[in-house]
Structures are given as C-alpha cells and as structure tokens.
C-alpha cells in the first residue's frame, strides 16, 4: 500500500458563476489543495486525460438532466487515470480506470464509480476517442441500434467533425451507406472528406445547407443523425424521405439557453413521410458496452476507424477547452491532457 502521509497537490476547476449563454473561461476558477486520502472502498486516481463533452454545459444550469453543479462545485468530466492508492478490492495500485473523474488532477472517490480499462497499453486519448461512453459507444448504439443503418441508405450527420459525429460517419460507411457530413468551416469539411471519408460535406457557415442537401441527396435522406438541433434539424426534416429515421443524439446549439429551446417547426414531415424521430442516451445500452467496445477496438486495430483529436494541455486549460467546444475552435474530439 502506498504511503498516504505524503499526498499530492491537486488542482481542480470549479464553477465561479453560471454562464450566461455559452461558457467562458471567466465563469470558472482553479483551486489547488491536498488530495484527499481514500477511505475504505475508495481509490485515489491520478487523472491522465479528460474528455470535453457538450453535456457538461447542461450541468452548469441550476437544474439539469445530468445533475446541477453548485457554485464553487467541481466541474463534472469523464476520463481516464491511474490508481495510485487503493483501499478497495476492486482495483490495485497501477490499474488504469475510466469514469467520472471530474475536472481535477487527482480524484478520490468510491471504487464502484470506475471501470478498469481492459487495454491499458492504448493511450488515454484513443481510449476516450474510440472507446469512450460519450464518443465511440454513443456513436455505435446511435447509428446501429437506434438508426438501424442499412447498405445504400443516405445518412446526414450534423456536428460531423466532432468526436461522435466523425465516428457515426465512419460506422455508417462501414455498413455501405452514403454519408453527408455537416460541419462549420472549410478546415473541418476538408477533414471530413480527406480523413473521415464522407461522400460529401456541407459547410453550414458558408453554404446554404438546404441547397446542398438537395444537391447531394435529391431524393431525400434516410437517416439524420443530429448532434446540433435548432435550424439544421428543421432543414433536415424538410429533406427526409419515406420511412426516414431522425436520431436525436444531442443539441449543442440549444444547451446554452435551455429556457428558450428552439424546437422543430417542421415535425409534421414525420407524419407526411411515415418517418420517426427518436432520442436516446447511451446509458440505455449499458449492458452491451463490453460487446460494443470489443467491436470498436477491432475496427480501430484494423485501421477502419479514426478520430481526429484536439488536445489542450494542462487542467488549467479545461475552461478554455470547454469554451472552444461551443465556439467551434476545435476539429475532432476535444480533450484535456492532465
């Protein structure tokens, strides 16, 4: 057992003020303190990497689906780390674990919150980008189980250059679908075409999205995988064809103003086209995480899956990374190297 008399200093990011709109660096503070010694059943984890997900923004409201962060409370975040002190039979010191590590450099928490990483030789960024709950697993179950994508179908993906979107594009292509990705800016669209391998990309910042969808899918789309919401959701609804599936994975365009969400006005297209719109969260598939992870890892090892990374260095840059997620300042899965 490691010596708990010489505990490390830990930095953590806390909520200073509730954001008015998109989160800004000034909404957060960084606090340094001695890491807490674990009690029985707990582990002390040295955090290696944290993922930056849009869901974090929802926790900054006073009420939230994922739980509300109090003022001065540590910001929630998922990631990977190494157990340095264990007072649990579940893990030994040196084990690599994944779970809700929070936005801090060391975490002391009940061991039951964490899962042992089965392939610790894989770097933490690939672990998060390919096998993460909010990335690879979300993409896998969203497009395969909820969307039921089939060969020769036309799939439209919003937020296609992000962690989930880029994987959805690739997983749909592996099933033989034609994929159209929507992203903001030429750089992201170039990544979609040259690295991710989509059939067509749409730059929503500089192109007319409706015209581009009609250009690339003149007979309509079979699946719309939505990570953005708002106006793009309505445009997609206006371009679905019979028996289409609209998958609501996220709505990053709406998270900063939950009190006045812009809902779809063209939902009657669902009735006209005998189509369906279905939302999901990955937690509904928890009992199947292991099988999905094995398939994703196999595809990655065969070179059939890739995820562009955008990594900010240091826990002190966690607020900047979160700000970038909402201003479009990243291409690929956004993470923090702790």
Image: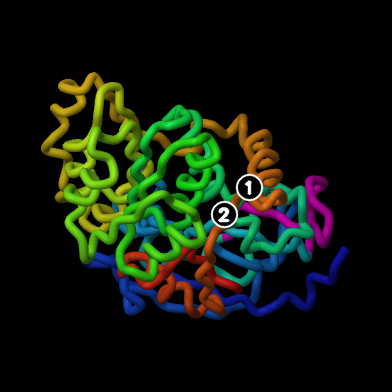
Colour option used: rainbow
Image position of 35 (left or right of 91): left
Q: Which residue is mark 2?
A: 100
**Is 195 above or below relative to 214?**
below
* Residue sitting nearer the eye, 321 or 196: 196
Q: Nearer the viewer, residue 215 or 60?
A: 215
Q: Are marks 2 and 1 in contact (CB under 8 Å)?
A: yes
The image quarter in which residue 207 lies: bottom left
* Quarter the C terminus occupies: bottom right
Q: Which residues are magenta?
A: 85-101
Q: Is 114 located above or below residue 319 in the figure?
A: above
Q: Is residue 274 visible?
A: yes
Any magenta on residue 98? yes
User: Mark 2 and mark 1: span between their CA atoms?
Assistant: 7 Å
Q: Can you identify the residue that label 1 sits on?
A: 113
Q: Position of residue 131 (x, y in %)?
A: 62, 49
The quadrant the N terminus occupies is bottom right
**Left or right of 211, for residue 93:** right
Residue 6, image x, y percentages: 77, 78
Q: Residues within 10 Å of mark 1 (few under 14, many from 20)?
A: few
What main secondary structure does the magenta stretch of the protein show? loop
75 sits left or right of 337 in the view: left
Which residue does the image show at 31% across and 54% down from the upper left?
A: 252
User: Residue 280: which quarter of the image?
Assistant: top left
How many labels, in total?
2
């Amino acid at each position: 057992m490691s010596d708990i008399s010489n505990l490390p200093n830990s930095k953590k990011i806390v909520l200073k003020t509730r954001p008015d709109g998109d989160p800004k660096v000034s909404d957060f503070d960084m606090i340094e303190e001695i890491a807490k010694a674990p009690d029985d059943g707990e582990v002390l984890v040295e955090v290696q990497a944290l993922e930056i997900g849009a869901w974090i923004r929802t926790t900054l409201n006073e009420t939230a689906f994922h739980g509300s962060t109090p003022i001065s409370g540590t910001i929630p975040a998922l990631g990977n780390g190494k157990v340095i002190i264990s007072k649990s039979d579940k893990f030994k010191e040196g084990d690599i674990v994944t779970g809700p590590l929070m936005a801090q450099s060391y975490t002391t928490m009940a061991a039951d919150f964490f899962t042992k990483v089965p392939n610790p030789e894989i770097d933490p960024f690939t672990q998060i980008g390919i096998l993460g709950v909010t990335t690879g697993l979300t993409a896998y179950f969203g497009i395969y189980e909820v969307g039921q994508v089939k060969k020769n179908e036309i799939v439209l993906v919003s937020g296609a250059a992000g962690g989930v979107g880029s994987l959805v594009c690739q997983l749909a292509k592996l099933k033989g679908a034609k994929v159209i990705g929507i992203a903001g800016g030429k750089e992201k669209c170039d990544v979609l075409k040259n690295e991710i391998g989509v059939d067509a990309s749409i730059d929503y910042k500089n192109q007319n999205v409706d015209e581009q969808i009609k250009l690339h899918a003149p007979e309509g789309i079979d699946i719309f995988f939505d990570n953005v919401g708002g106006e793009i959701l309505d445009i997609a609804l206006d371009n679905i064809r019979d028996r289409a599936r609209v998958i609501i994975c996220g709505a990053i365009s709406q998270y900063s103003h939950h009190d006045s969400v812009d809902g779809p006005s063209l939902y009657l297209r669902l009735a006209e086209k005998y189509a369906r719109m279905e939302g999901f969260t990955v937690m509904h598939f928890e009992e199947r995480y292991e099988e999905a992870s094995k398939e994703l890892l196999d595809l990655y090892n065969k070179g059939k899956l890739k995820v562009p990374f955008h990594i900010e260095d240091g826990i002190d840059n966690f607020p900047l990374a979160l700000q970038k997620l909402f201003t479009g300042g990243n291409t690929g899965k956004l993470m923090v190297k702790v």
